[in-house]
Each structure stands twice: as structure tokens, then as C-alpha cells.
Image (tube, grey):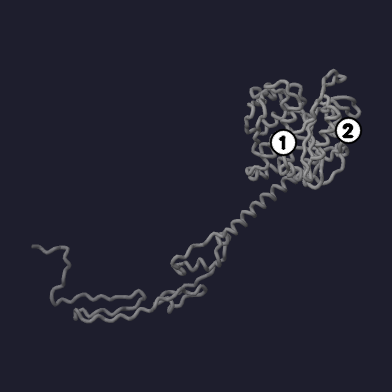
Amino acid sequence: MPDDPKAPRRPPEGEERPQYTLYRSGGRRVPARDEKKGTGPKQPRAPRPPSPGPAPRDGPRSPDQAGGDRPEYTLYRSRRGPLTRLRGGGGGDDGLDRLDGLGDEPGRRGPQVGWRRVLLWVAGIIAAWLALSFVLFMVSAQVQRGKVSDAARNALDDGGNVALSPTTILVLGSDARASGSLEQGANKVGQPSRSDSIMLLRVGRGKSARLSIPRDTVVTIPGSGRNKINAAYAIGGPQLAIRTVKQYLGIKINHIVEVDFQNFPQFINALGGIDFTAKRCLRSNVDGGTRNGGVTIRFRRGQTRHLNGRQVLALSRIRVNDCNPRENDVDRAERQQQVIGAIKGQLLSPGTFFRLPWVSWSAPKAIRTDMGGPSLMGLFLDIALGGSPPTRVLKPSGAETLPDGGQGLVVSEQEKRAEVKRFLKG
């Protein structure tokens, strides 16, 4: 049989075997066994030096520690970076101990997350976000403050800080519409216009009250005789409206806020819109309705819808409710107060925090007021953090025919005194 090709070839008898030289990893030569003697005694191997421990953290490793003729290495300690601090790492040499397996210990964990540092970073980001929002609010408030006339300021009564003392604020919204509005009978912005809404706020030192005056209430306007109360704004601007309300109710007014309906929708949109729940059926076409470029409002009783800025403005201005044509200014004032409550709820929502700089910039732009940044900030905080006062509206007891033939509402003296007392008590 032929030889098995896989069988190793054995040198013939008497032929010398090749010599091999063995080297140890350290570079040392190992004496070969005497092949001629065949099974001669094996040369004893020198005992292997004990494995050196880990090299010092600072400085080079010596050849005696490394064993053999290993080249020398110099270890350098790295400076701790921000990521190392965030992970809670110790000194810079901790990472070097792990190079080439140095410092590896069974069961030893990797770098631990420093939760205190994470919380500090988060707190710093939140503080910076709030500081940015505060600066934007103050700058925007200062710009808007200059839009109130000196005559209006002179008509106001002195009052303390909004956050520290009870303060009465008159809120006015004109019925002027933006150019291009299709609503019949409405004046355009820049033209003499009547006050569309008249509301009093009582805030400061735990006070929280609202009182609305129907815009068709008949009063005596200083220097103009008997007329609807909303005509005071058209005749003499905010200063005459302040004097008229003070005389009619017999109270002091410390500050004025005029709602800028051109910028009001932007403020609502910065909040992300509001949720409004209709207490009764509501249906109206404002500014001609959606088909004509306006807004169509549709609510079933008890229905909740999310509204944007344009829809909220239209909701506040509804004059005729097709579901109930008999509604009057009392119902309209109640809806306006409900809108304020919805804005307050949105201000306190978690999502508003992420929009806070935009809200802070647009909030003062939605109004014109004599208050500076700190007082206006106190007002917004009081509205947001204060209680939810009940909706109070002066209820008319009859009607009166005006000299021009128009009809107005009359509020009895008893009703007026009772509501003013509740309002001042807060």
C-alpha cells in the first residue's frame, strides 16, 4: 500500500534532526534539549518571576516591575472635563488605570452617574430660562407703558404695589375692528370707538374679585349728560372712561388696562390656545363668519373646544347668539370673565413653561397700561396664582330711553351698592 500522505515524515535512522532555537517572550534564549540523547532529562526551567502588581499611577513602570525587557511607558494624568464631572468621575487618573487592563478589578463598576450634578445642571437651565423670560417681559412691558397718555394717568388714583396692597384695575376693550373687518357698524382701529367691555379687577393681599358693567348701562358722563357708559371712551378716551366709572360706582381706580385686540390673538397663540367650555348653546358668525373671512363659533351646551387666538377674540365679541337671541350684555360679560378664567388655567399648565419666553414677550404687547414691569408682573402672578372669584355682573332692573331715542339699561342703586361692597371686600 502507498504511504499515507497525511502521516508525518520521520527522518531515516542516523539522519540528524534540524535544530530549533526557542525564545521566551522577554527576549531570552532558552537552551534546546539534547536531541541526540532523545529521551534525556529535560532541562529545568527557571522559575518565572512573580507577576508584578499594577504600575504606580504617576511615573513610568520599571523593567523589574514589568518583567523582561519591556519598553518603558510614561503615564500622564488628564484634566477632568465637563462630561467627566457630569458622570461623577473622580480624578483624571481613574481613566488611566484602565488603560491596557491596568486597574481592572473583578466586579468593579464603570463610572457612576452623579445625580446631584444632573440636578444642578437642570436647575441651572431652568433658572436661565426663567431669567430670559423675566427680561423679555420687563422690556415688553416698558415699551407698552409709554402708550398710555398722561391724561389717563392723571385720572387715576394713587395706589400701592399690586402685589402688596389691594388695588382696583379698570380693564377696557374697545369695539374697534382691524381694517378689512366685515362686521357691520364697527369702527376701525384709529377711529373713535366705544368700549366693548368694561371690567373691574380687585387684586393684591389676598383680594380676588371681578365686576363687569354692561356696556349699555345708562350713566351720567361728566360734561356730556346721560348716555350709555361705553360712549365715554368714544367721547373722551380712557381718561373720560375712568372718570365716568369712578363717579358712577363711587370707588377709586388705581390702574388702567386697555386690551389691544390687534395683538391679543398673538398672546393667546403664544399660550398654545385655551380650552373653553360653553355653559349653554352658542352659535354666531363674527365678522361675517368663516365663509366671508370672519370666524364662525359653534358650541353645544357643555361642549369643550380648544380655541386659537382669533377664535378667542371672536368669542369675546359675540353680540348676537343665534341659539338665544334674547341674550344681553350680562351674558356677554359672563363669557368674557369665563375667557379670563380659561387664560388663567392655561398660564398654570405645564406646557406653558416651555413657551414662557414667547408668552412673556407677547403678554404685555396684548395690552396698554400705566403699570410698569414689576407691577404688571405682580398682576399676572396674582391672576395666575390667586383664587377663582365668582362671576359678578351688574344686573339691570329696567330700561331707559336716551335723548337720541336709543334704549339703555338701568341698574338700581341697591344692586349697585351691594355689588360694589362685595367687590371691595374681595
Q: Quadrant of the N terminus?
A: bottom left
Crowding at mark 2 (Cα within 10 Å: few <14, some 14-19, many 20+): some
Q: Quadrant of the C terminus?
A: top right
Q: Disc 2 designates what residue?
A: 247
Extreme residue toward the left, this view: 1
Residue pictured at 64% horizontal, 29% vertical: 302
Taking the image as drawn, is residue 43 in sight?
A: yes
Residue pictured at 47% horizontal, 72% vertical: 73
Residue pictured at 70% horizontal, 31% vertical: 313
Number of marks drawn: 2
Question: Tag 1's secondary structure?
Answer: helix
Coordinates of residue 271 in the picture (x, y in percent): 66, 39
Question: Tag 2's secondary structure?
Answer: helix
Coordinates of residue 3 in the picture (x, y in percent): 11, 64
Compared to residue 206, the image places residue 286 above or below, namely above
Say which amino acid is labelled 2. Gln
Of residues 174 and 292, which is closer to you in this image? 174
Of residues 3 and 244, which is closer to you in this image? 244
Of residues 53 and 320, which is closer to you in this image? 320
Coordinates of residue 34 in the picture (x, y in percent): 22, 80
Give the numbered dot on residue 340: 1
Q: CA distance from mark 2 to mark 1?
A: 26 Å
- Closer to the chain start, of discs 2 and 1, is 2
Of residues 145 and 380, which is closer to you in this image? 380
Give the numbered dot on residue 274: none
Q: Is 96 displayed left or right of 357 in the figure? A: left
Label pair 2/1, CB-CB below 8 angstroms: no
Compared to residue 367, the image places residue 320 above or below, namely above
Crowding at mark 1 (Cα within 10 Å: few <14, some 14-19, many 20+): some
